[in-house]
Image (cartoon, rainbow, N blue to C red):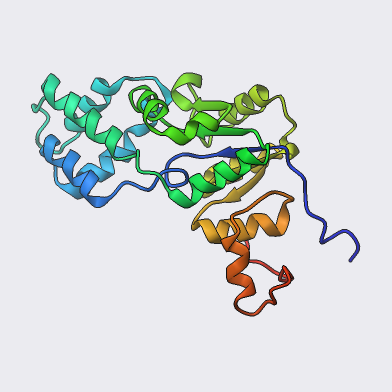
Amino acid sequence: MQGLSQKRSVRAVVFDYGNVLSLDQTSEDMKGMALVCGTPHERFSELYWKLRPPYDRGDIDGPAYWTAVIGRQEGQQELALSRDQIATLIKLDRESIIRPNLGAVQWAELLHHEGFPLTLLSNMPLELSRHVTKSFPSLSTFEHLIYSCDYRSIKPELAIYRNCLELLKAAPEEILYLDDRAENIEAAARLGINAVLFDAVEKTAARVESRFDIPVPSYGRRRQSSSQYSSTNQRPDRMESD
């Protein structure tokens, strides 16, 4: 049907950070923090995420967050963390999120080179966000760094997406947003933002290429042309859905 194959144009790209630009935390990362807390690994992982929203939103600071984690251990309410332990936990937490996802970073560099303004939109507390800004060199090409702690709102709350739109001074349909969590994608889409779920870089690039007029890493096309598609840049009629 006429018009169905036409790609959408966007003028800015917004990236999530965790598990997109950076690699996911490892089991060893979590075990190291659990050991400092004196908490079984499984229980620690549960509390780490369950109690995270107020910390990401900026309602509490690092010491208050880690005190809450240690205070929620069953049968061990009298335990307390020393200043040194809290400092160690914040340090380990920072280090656990700083490993770059090279494929995504290279994609962001390609977009920057092609003139697309880049923005970071991430749920992150104060202590971690400042460390990421200083220690993750690829962010130097990003025009805006939007951290939840600075806006007192976390994804998937709509307020932080509205803050993003206001900062970019762009209409929702002019933005492409990449995030690894379905609830964050759905919230952005409710405001009219072009939102695509991020998983493996190659799969995500293929989905984006099929829908948007925007540069993607070249290996996404090479893999297709080396299998059932010809080497003449012919694209498939159907791509994996979001």
- Name the foreground residue: 6 vs 112: 112
Q: Is residue 23 above or below residue 137?
A: below
How many numbered badges does the structure rendering display?
Answer: 0
Residue 105 at least partly seen: yes
Instruction: Indicate the quadrant containing the N terminus: top left, top right, bottom left or bottom right.
Output: bottom right
Q: Quadrant of residue 51?
A: top left
Q: Residue at x 72, y 37 (%)?
A: 11
Image quadrant in which the C terminus is located: bottom right
In this orientation, which residue lies closer to the viewer: 27 or 158?
27
| Residue at x 54%, y 60% (from the top left corner) | 202
Residue 170 in the image: state x and y as whole percent. Answer: 73, 29
Left or right, 54 with respect to 34, comes to right
Judged left or right of residue 46, residue 163 is right
Q: In terms of image quadrants, where is residue 86?
A: top left
Depth check: give the residue in front, 68 or 224. 224
Residue 150 drawn at (x, y percent): 47, 19
Q: Is residue 219 left or right of residue 123?
A: right
Image x and y of residue 161, in percent: 60, 31
Image height check: is 231 above or below 15?
below
Asked whether residue 240 appears in the rendered view, the answer is no
x and y percentages locating residue 50 in the rendered image: 33, 38
Q: Residue at x 66, y 66 (%)?
A: 239
Lateral position of residue 47 relative to residue 167, left or right: left
> Is 153 placed above or below 113 here?
above
- Does residue 35 sit above or below 135 in this rendering? below
Q: Residue furthest right?
A: 2
Residue 37: quadrant of the picture: top left
